[in-house]
Image (cartoon, helix red, strand yellow):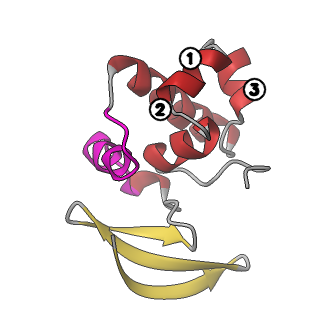
């Protein structure tokens, strides 16, 4: 990821980054900040950046997260993905080891969920 430009938005530093040949807006932790800049090809690259090879099960979780964000305006927590998305927590930890909510948000091109460290 190559950072080009930065500014402040809501107290958070925003930067322009180039990922897989696409310029995207990211926060100071590398999470994308503009919903419409994301694509599945970009998601594949983001997943690869953190050592995840996407399968249909991965995509089901990512698509749920993006649709939920579009309707709710916030990135779903792990509990919401399990309860509303119907994906068991154990499966999420298998698909996205150690920090599934954070990793799913990163791959989905969404802000880090509230409460994630």
Mark earlier in primary sequence (2, 1): 2
The N terminus - image quarter: bottom left
Magenta span = 37-53
Location of residue 26 with respect to 80 vertically, above or below: below
Residue ID at (79%, 50%): 115
The picture quadrant where one finds residue 84 is: top right
Residue ID at (76%, 50%): 114
| Distance from the alpha carbon under mark 2 to that under mark 1 | 13 Å
Location of residue 48 with respect to 76 vertically, above or below: below
Location of residue 2 with respect to 53 vertically, above or below: below
The C terminus - image quarter: bottom right
Mark earlier in primary sequence (3, 2): 2
The x and y percentages for residue 40 are: 31, 40
Tell which tag, 1 or 3, sits nearer the viewer: 1
Find disc 2 in the rendering and name its residue. Answer: 62
Mark earlier in primary sequence (1, 3): 3
């Amino acid at each position: 990821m190559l950072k080009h430009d930065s500014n402040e938005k809501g107290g958070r530093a925003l930067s322009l980054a180039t990922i897989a040949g696409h310029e995207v807006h990211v926060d100071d932790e590398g999470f994308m900040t503009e919903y419409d800049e994301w694509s599945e090809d970009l998601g594949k690259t983001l997943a690869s950046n953190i050592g995840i090879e996407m399968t249909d099960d991965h995509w089901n979780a990512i698509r749920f997260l993006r649709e939920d964000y579009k309707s709710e305006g916030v990135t779903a927590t792990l509990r919401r993905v399990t309860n509303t998305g119907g994906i068991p927590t154990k499966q999420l930890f298998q698909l996205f080891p150690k920090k599934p909510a954070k990793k799913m948000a990163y791959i989905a091109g969404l802000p880090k969920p509230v409460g994630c460290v």
